[in-house]
Amino acid sequence: MEHGSLTDSTSSTFSIMEEDHTLANSARFVLNQDPRVAFCGYSIPHPAEKKVNIRVQTTGDAAKDVLKDALQNLMIMCQHVRGTLDNAVANHRAKNTTAEQMDVDRK
Amino acid sequence: MPKKGTKSKEVDNAPNQQENKLPDYLEVQRTRVVCNADAPIHTQGYQYSGTFAAMGVDNSVSVEKFCKNFKIEINRLTEDDMEFDMIGIDASIANAFRRILIAEVPTMAIEKIFMVDNTSVIADEVLSHRLGLIPLRADPRLFDYISENDVPNERNTVVYKLHVSCPKGSQRITVKSSELEWLPEGSQLSMAAPAQSGDKQKTFTSFSQSQKEILEEPLGVKFKDITIARLGPGQAIELEAHAVKGVGKVHAKWSPVATAWYRMLPEVVILKDIEGDDAEELVKKCPVNVFDIEDLGNGGKRAVVAKPRACTLCRECVMGPNGNQVELRRVRDHFIFTIESTGALPPEVLFTEAVKILEEKCERVISELS
């Protein structure tokens, strides 16, 4: 859900249900990396309510598009993390099996 | 022959290639948390991309830059725990992974108990709670969530049976988790007597096929030596336990990790050479032996940092009269991440699942915005 004005699309507050610091803090970090963002922050209005408000103010682009791009970037980063971990695990396993084989050879 | 075009292009690129550097003290503030004797400083960091724009320094982390710099190095990987270094990532995202691991990666856990008989000294509700906390060896990815109105079937429920009794006149017995028996055909308890003798008995689950057919491995419990209860002579427990899929934020029994945590990489810097007796004193001061002595010849001694990773940040070395000779720092974008799995899934799979869940969250919000 988006709260903004009809005339000015550059600043909006997005109310996201069923989310918490996990997404909002990551989204705020990615938004802050975007040079189009003039201000962004988030708040949880009440700790018992499963809801976060993310405020985005931009230097000209529509806040909605900037937020969408930020989340898209976060997804790409996640995919890269996943790929990197898979590679690291494969390398670690390969290294350990060769080390074990060497031990066996020595015996 | 050098082309004119390429040459002029190089000149154009020159100011971009030659990156402006921040002065040392600002670079430390940007990339390190400095732990002084009284309190840590520069803890907040600079998130805004244009913080140093006036000095011509780009503080942003674009996706390309992130992909180039991000690294994972695995230090330890066993069946149910792992430690790895995650380098080049912001705390907000590392923390998102940690939070998701603890609270949002699903597992299977016992949720419903059908108590037929319990004459043991342990009360029904306490026994049920204990059963709920037992880690099950069942891959949650093969099951669906069950909602309130759903009928328990082979895709969303795992049924276990516990039937033990201690014969009269014998020794007390201990009921271990290995006594839990998996029922791949579903519940064996009938809800009511069949209306007609030919009808199939109605039970608490409606399995259309045996779970043996849809699962590759038989299910069970992860640890066979968990004490569930003790029975005296003549006491018995008979019950059926239904396990369902859930997440840790609903109840900790569904948390797939014993815990998951990270710490920032410690960095110990000796600002001024520490020699002689002062060096000896410094080495002795540190309870985890971060420092070591380097022989300079002619009996000269100098303190060096040998094992900065062991630093627990007790700050003993930065206190006292010689405290200003050492500086304790933490590297802001280098995390030593540890995952201890409870056994349903191996730790590296848990981390992959956690990352996937963050992706799904992004996707959900993007689709809501469009």
Image: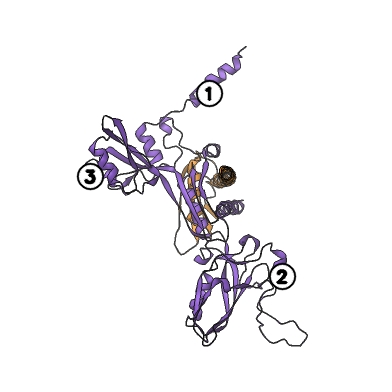
Chain colours: A orange, B purple
Query: Element under label 3?
Result: loop
Disc 1: host chain: B
How far is the residue under mark 3 from the one under mark 2?
70 Å
User: Label 3 sits on what residue type?
Assistant: Gly
User: Label 2 sits on what residue type?
Assistant: Ser
User: Would you identify the image quadrant in which residue B36 lies?
Assistant: top left
- The answer to the question of whether label 3 and label 2 lie on touching residues, with beta carbons closer than 8 A, is no
User: Label 1 sits on what residue type?
Assistant: Asn
Labels 2, 1: one chain = yes
Residue B179 in the image: state x and y as whole percent: 58, 74
* Residue indicated by mark 2: B210
Q: Is A12 situated left or right of B154 in this image?
A: left
- How many residues crowd mark 1 within 10 Å: few (<14), some (14–19), many (20+)? few
How far is the residue under mark 2 from the one under mark 1?
67 Å
**Residue at the limit of the structure toward the left, as seen here:** B321
Mark found first going from the N terminus, 1 or 3 = 1
Query: Element under label 1?
Result: helix
Label number found at residue B320: 3
Residue A37 in the image: state x and y as whole percent: 49, 42
* Residue indicated by mark 1: B13
Can residue B266 be seen by looking at this rendering? no
Q: Nearer the viewer, residue B117 or B11?
A: B117
Determine whether B153 is above or below B282 in the image: below
Disc 2: host chain: B
